[in-house]
Amino acid sequence: MSEVLAMKRVKKAGALGAFAAVAFLASGCGATRPSKYYQLAPPTPSSATTAQEQLPISLILGPIYTSHLYREDRIVYSSEHEQMGTYETERWSEPPVEMIRDVLLRKLRGSGRYRDVGTLRSGARGDFVLRGRLYDFKEVTGKLFAGRLSIELEMRDTKTNATVWTHVYNYDEPVTGKDVPAVVAALDRNVQRATNEVAAALDQYFAAHPPVK
């Protein structure tokens, strides 16, 4: 009887030890890394604009359409074979499409070139409406390590309902480091470059098609 009891005690102790080991491993697997959040920098300030240079135009920034990937806060990466994924703990503070739209809005407002720059959400009425589509805003790895931004914008005349201006931007900004913050910095530089280019392209359009005062 004593040997049987001893064997039962050994088996029970072994079972408890195995349970403790499983519980320890589970607690280790359950530990998650804290998330890190990133945001885009505000647009670079424009040079001072005199009152004579201001155009009597009211611009409205409409929606920028995109896939569900860029309507969420995940940072997207892809390989040269276009296989895509998202980082789990490295995220944007807001969905990329909203951040890009906000940087463009602030860039156009800060330029001082327009009488007013508003949004459709504000209910404002404008002379022209800008809208667009975001195709890519992601890390690209392979032969090239870069932050890719691909976006198309168009402007519609609210009086005629005709599309009077379009602009396509595609650029791969080289990543200077090997981690996610370096990728974010490259994407941020790309957005700054894009908004500067869009603002300049709009200036060229209105210089060629001056509004009637």
Image (tube, helix red, strand yellow):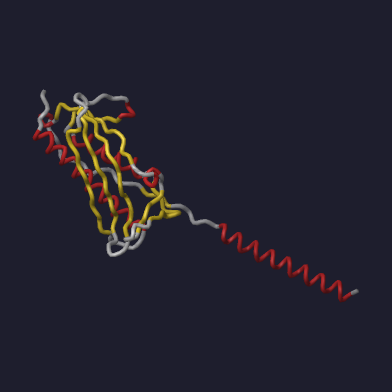
Judge from the rendering whether residue 111 lies leftward or rightward of residue 142; answer left or right. Answer: left
Q: Which quarter of the rendered picture does the N terminus lie within?
A: bottom right
Circle count: 0
State the image coordinates of residue 15 (x, y, percent, origin top left).
73, 67
Q: Quadrant of the C terminus?
A: top left
Q: Residue furthest right?
A: 1
Q: Which residue: 23% across, 50% down? A: 170
Quarter-of-image position of residue 166: top left
Residue 61: image quadrant is: top left
Q: Work out whether 39 lies above or below 48.
A: below
Vertical relation: 25 (above or below) 92: below
Q: Residue at x 35, y 56 (%)?
A: 181
The quarter of the picture where residue 26 lies is bottom right
**Drawn side of residue 208 relative to residue 98, left or right:** left
Residue 94 seen from this side: no
Viewer-closest of 127 and 160: 160
Provide residue 21's location: percent of width, then percent of height: 65, 66
Residue 159 at x, y = what percent?
20, 24
**Whole-percent x, y for residue 79 in the image:** 34, 60
Image: 151 above or below 183: above
Q: Is residue 30 above or below residue 161?
A: below
| Image-based side of 187 in relation to 18, left or right | left
Q: Can residue 30 be seen from the camera position used here?
A: yes
Whether residue 211 sits left or right of residue 13 in the image: it is left
Residue at the spot 21% in from the left edge and 29% down from the top edge: 128
